[in-house]
Amino acid sequence: MHELWQASQHAMVLLFTGNRDLWEIIGISFSVSLKAIVIATPAAFAAAFVLAYTRFRGRGVVMSIMNTSLSLPAVVVGLTLYLLLSRSGPFGDLRLLFTQTAMTIGQVILAFPLVFVMSHSAIQSGQRAAWETALTLGASPIRAVLTVLYEVRFGLIAAVIAGFGRIVAEVGSSMMVGGNIAHFTRNIPTAIALETSKGEFAQGIALGFVLLVLAFGLNIGLSLMQRKGGVAA
Amino acid sequence: MYRLMTLVLGAALALTSSIAGAATPLRLATTTSTDNSGLLDVLLPKFKKATGISVHVIAVGTGKALRLGANGDVDVLLVHAPPAEMKYMHAGHGVNRRKVMYNDFVIVGPASDPAGIKGGKDAVKAFEAIAKHHATFVSRGDDSGTNKKELILWKDAHIKPSGKWYRAAGQGMGKVLQIAGELNAYTLTDRGTWLAYEDKVPLKILVQGDARLFNPYHVIAVNPNEYPDVDYTGAMQFIAWLTSVPGQRAIRDYRLHGKQLFHPTAITKQ
Amino acid sequence: MKPMLSLTGIHKRFGARCILDNVDVHLAPGQCQVLTGRNGAGKTTLLKIIAGLERPEAAQVAIDGNERGWRRARSALRRDVVYLHQYAYMFDASVEYNVGYGLRAARLPPSQRRARVAEALERIDLLHLAGANARTLSGGERQRVALARAWALQPRVMLLDEPTANMDRESREQTWFLLRRLKSDELCVVVATHDGHAIATLPDIELHLDNGNLFPHAVDTHSHRPTPGPVATGSAAGPRLEERG
């Protein structure tokens, strides 16, 4: 108990005195995860819209694949991506292994199903009348899509928040394809794993605290959005 | 609102296209024990000062480090598992293997010492005693250099460790020391990690100084004939510097908690 | 009076069920048509096809006498025809935004757009609610905003799908009153409704949809209006009319 208290105190000192290494790790985490969510979101929205508004053969298969990938473990994504990006793998020539880009790709894969499934249910909960009203008032299909998305914006924002929350805390894929390289691919979760294994609990706690605050903030945002979405629907 | 969404989409695209590769630094795969000891934090800045090359360290178990080399995912290896290294060299995955340094392993355990191995100099005898008393032993169980060394010692003692007293953790050295501390168990650890944990776990060094516990490190360049675009020149510069007088001196002078951890072996007379 | 819009030979089925079987519709400017029929007879489907929102299995479309393929016709229909849902859908924004939506899509300059929105809101006596969120309005108010929203676009055809369903009498009468006020010589209005009062007072032509076929119906005898002009008929229904008679 005493040790935990001491480490926590040290952690706060590290955080609030602007320890450079620590904030660099936090910066890498945000840079990678924000890029990933920014890439995954438009694709997921577009796919969710198509699935919600069109009927085609194999639609059910796509839905169940997506629902299954919700529980895709990060390490499995990491391992698969490692094998693909390795020099001896099919995409080895891209030289992406152990780069932030590889971490971003892994997180895009992890974020996509979650953002897709949540935004799909948000779009589906919206009324088809919104789509028809936009079209009959002369909106182009693209504008009509944006209108429909805007109508369910709280649900969509909730989807993005949930997706970001998932990837910013995942360790399996980042460790595997990022390699936890100091100052380069070391993000919050891999640093926590490393610092803990080195017995440097203060650093681990400081970073864990950042994740905790982040998760707390995201959850507040999420429930806020879901409540608003519930009222608007 | 339409405009806002276009703006967001545009920003998304701009961000996406900004992901571009930077100049690729030298990639070194090494073991967690080397990295965790803090030695590389001293060596690599000196290497960069001498050559201008920055190094990305990927710290994994020795087994995985060799695998990364065989796959061409790194340029150079710094590892400590001679039999596995020899296999790796024979398979043609590496060139120019050089001795760099050694540190040593120690057997640690609870102060109560139920197997009565304290003060011994023979690692194999100590393992025999632990097995005989069915005293709890925590193994790395992760195919790391330390794990390989441990398995060789069991083999030398003609014991196939199994049963409730033998726990394979599948974790890094630090974690294993923590687990051993919690379980009042014995374990084999490298001295570097031990020094970092000495104050944090209720364990003591019980056996040390056996020649079989020496832990030699070698540096190996990944074979450029297998993967033409590995950074072979960088790897050779790294090997050259590590085995040069300044490199060896830096290894000798490194102190953790006031104690020397690594003994240079590339140049024996200094 | 020449029809500006003709859809002939409309076929539509949902699965095995045939909703519309070779139906013809002719629409002329300044005209008001009332569409009647049982629930589920296909009134909504027919209106949505005319609005270019639903795709028929077959149909020939002529706009101002020019035949068009479905793809080109569809964009013309979406531009010239406005469909109003039974329960008006309000975008989650102000009344002003809702009424200006189509004008924004048509890239009308903001100053003109504001003027047109104000004019439309004035016509339906809701100028005082311009800043309110449209989702907070009552059902009757929503229907009026939807009317203004359509009218602001100056469409050639307005299709109203049961606009007074589930409304109290006062709102119903107000809706019909406003619709009459919005009518003009250029605009063609088609209303699907069960409301006897509207059927009696509003239309030039009444059409009855039954069993996938469209029957022209003379307006009731007690109506003060004369019998309809020859513009709109259900051609397939012609012979059947005799059978019925």
Image: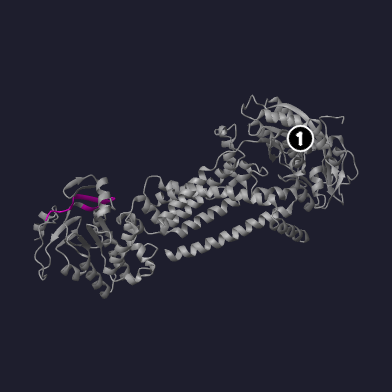
Q: Which residue is mark 1?
A: B80
User: Does residue A10 appear anywhere in the picture?
Assistant: yes
Q: Which residues are magenta?
A: C1-20
Q: Quadrant of residue C51?
A: bottom left
Relative to the observer, which residue lies in front, B246 or C56?
A: B246
Q: Quadrant of residue A176?
A: top right
| Label 1 neighbour load within 10 Å: few <14, some 14-19, many 20+ | many
Counting from the top left corner in percent of width and height, residue C236 is at 14, 52
Query: Is residue A228 shown left or right of residue B57?
Result: left
Counting from the top left corner in percent of width and height, residue C56 is at 25, 49
Question: What residue is at 27 percent from the left and 55 percent from the top?
Answer: C48
Relative to the observer, which residue lies in front, C234 or C29?
A: C29
Query: Is residue A107 shown left or right of residue B146?
Result: left
* Quarter in which the C terminus of chain A is drawn: bottom left
Does B117 lie within the magenta span?
no
User: Does residue A133 appear anywhere in the picture?
Assistant: no
* Quarter in which the N terminus of chain A is drawn: bottom right
Helix, strand or loop under label 1: loop
Per the picture, the main secondary structure of the magenta-coloured stretch is strand
* Vertical position of residue A127 compared to residue B191: above or below: below
Counting from the top left corner in percent of width and height, residue C77 is at 25, 52
Question: What residue is at 51 percent from the left and 54 percent from the top?
Answer: A160
Counting from the top left corner in percent of width and height, residue C129 is at 35, 70
Query: Is residue B132 shown left or right of residue A206?
Result: right
Q: Amino acid at mark 1?
A: His
